[in-house]
């Protein structure tokens, strides 16, 4: 096989993926263009007013969030990642047997220690 035949075979394998990527981009751009052309354009004062979570703001929007909010968000992400690691472990549990169970218990134990530490420090309290 020559180099060009190998290239064509390689591209033929990935054509369906590229087709769906292009199709998704075209669909996304098309829906944005059509919606911007068909949407009603009636700028009412209520529509143009500033709001925050569906209610009138009571302070400056540039006010910094408390650090506690970011800690709470980071803890959520960390414990969410732990749950993601449990799915592949559960799929191959019969193949990894006892050693896999022990490793997962250590993994969950470390997260449990971190959870208790965060709880004792008050990071989970929403004031």
Image (tube, grey):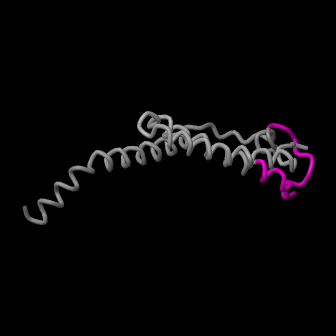
Residue 58 is a magenta residue: yes
Query: How many discs mark residues in the rendered view?
Result: 0
Residue 82 is a magenta residue: no
Q: Who's the residue at 72% across and 42% down the image?
A: 43
Q: Who's the residue at 52% across and 44% down the image?
A: 32
Q: Who's the residue at 74% across and 49% down the image?
A: 114
Quadrant into which the N terminus falls: bottom left
Residue 36 position in % (x across, y down): 56, 43
Residue 33 position in % (x across, y down): 50, 45
The image shows residue 121, relative to residue 44, as above or below, that is: below
The image shows residue 67, relative to residue 52, as above or below, that is: below
Looking at the rendering, which quadrant does residue 104 occupy? top right
Looking at the rendering, which quadrant does residue 16 occupy? top left
In the displayed orientation, state which residue is furthest to the bottom. Answer: 3
Residue 110 position in % (x across, y down): 68, 48
Viewer-proximal residue, 22 or 80?
80
Majority secondary structure of magenta residues: loop
Write down the region rendered in magenta.
54-72
Q: Who's the residue at 41% across and 37% down the image?
A: 95
């Amino acid at each position: 096989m020559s180099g060009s035949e190998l290239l064509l075979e390689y591209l033929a394998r990935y054509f369906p993926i590229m087709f769906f990527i292009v199709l998704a981009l075209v669909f996304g751009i098309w829906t944005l263009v059509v919606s911007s052309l068909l949407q009603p354009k009636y700028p009412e004062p209520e529509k143009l007013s500033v709001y925050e979570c569906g209610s009138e703001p009571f302070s400056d929007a540039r006010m910094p969030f408390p650090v506690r909010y970011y800690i709470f968000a980071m803890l959520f992400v960390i414990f969410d990642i732990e749950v993601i690691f449990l799915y592949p472990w559960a799929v191959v549990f019969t193949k990894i047997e006892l050693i896999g169970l022990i490793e997962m218990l250590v993994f969950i134990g470390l997260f449990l220690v971190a959870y208790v530490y965060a709880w004792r420090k008050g990071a989970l309290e929403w004031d």
